[in-house]
Image (cartoon, rainbow, N blue to C red):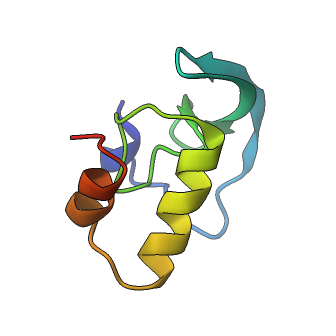
Amino acid sequence: MTTRLCPYRNDSKNKITKGGFYTTKNDSERRQMLYCCGGKHRYSETSYSGLRGKQGSFKEYEQAAKFFCYGLSADAIADVLEKT
């Protein structure tokens, strides 16, 4: 089951637990995996981001979050960070 289709993803009663770590090819910093107890699947801490699938360093992810807070679209952020 993909996280985008999980019926439990916005359920406040759904239990979310830590489910290990992963690293990307662009960054050696460990990232948290989470486990959805209702949907019984693992997902990454960035899977609900508009930049899903565009792997980058944690610094780039922080920058993307800041740009998003200023109202930039996911496409514009990906263009600025050259992640198209």
- Please name the residue shown 67% across and 65% down the image: 13
Can residue 73 be seen at all in this image of the molecule?
A: yes
Where residue 51 sits in the image (x, y, percent)?
36, 49
Can residue 37 be seen at all in this image of the molecule?
A: no
Q: Residue furthest bottom?
A: 70
- How many numbered marks appear? 0
Quadrant (top left, top right, bottom left, bottom right) of the N terminus: top left
- Position of 11 with respect to 22 (left or right) is left
**Is 17 placed above or below 71 here?**
above
- Please name the residue shown 75% across and 26% down the image: 30
Quadrant (top left, top right, bottom left, bottom right) of the C terminus: top left
Quadrant of the image occupied by residue 33: top right
**Is 30 placed above or below 73 here?**
above
**Is 65 placed above or below 34 here?**
below
Where residue 59 sits in the image (x, y, percent)?
63, 47
- Please name the residue shown 55% across and 50% down the image: 61
Where residue 67 sits in the image (x, y, percent)?
45, 72
- Please name the residue shown 53% across and 65% down the image: 65
- Position of 66 with respect to 73 (left or right) is right
**Is 66 placed above or below 15 here?**
below
Where residue 40 sits in the image (x, y, percent)?
56, 31
In this view, the residue in front, 7 or 62, is 62
In this view, the residue in front, 1 or 77, is 77
- Position of 42 with respect to 17 (left or right) is left
In this view, the residue in front, 51 or 59, is 59
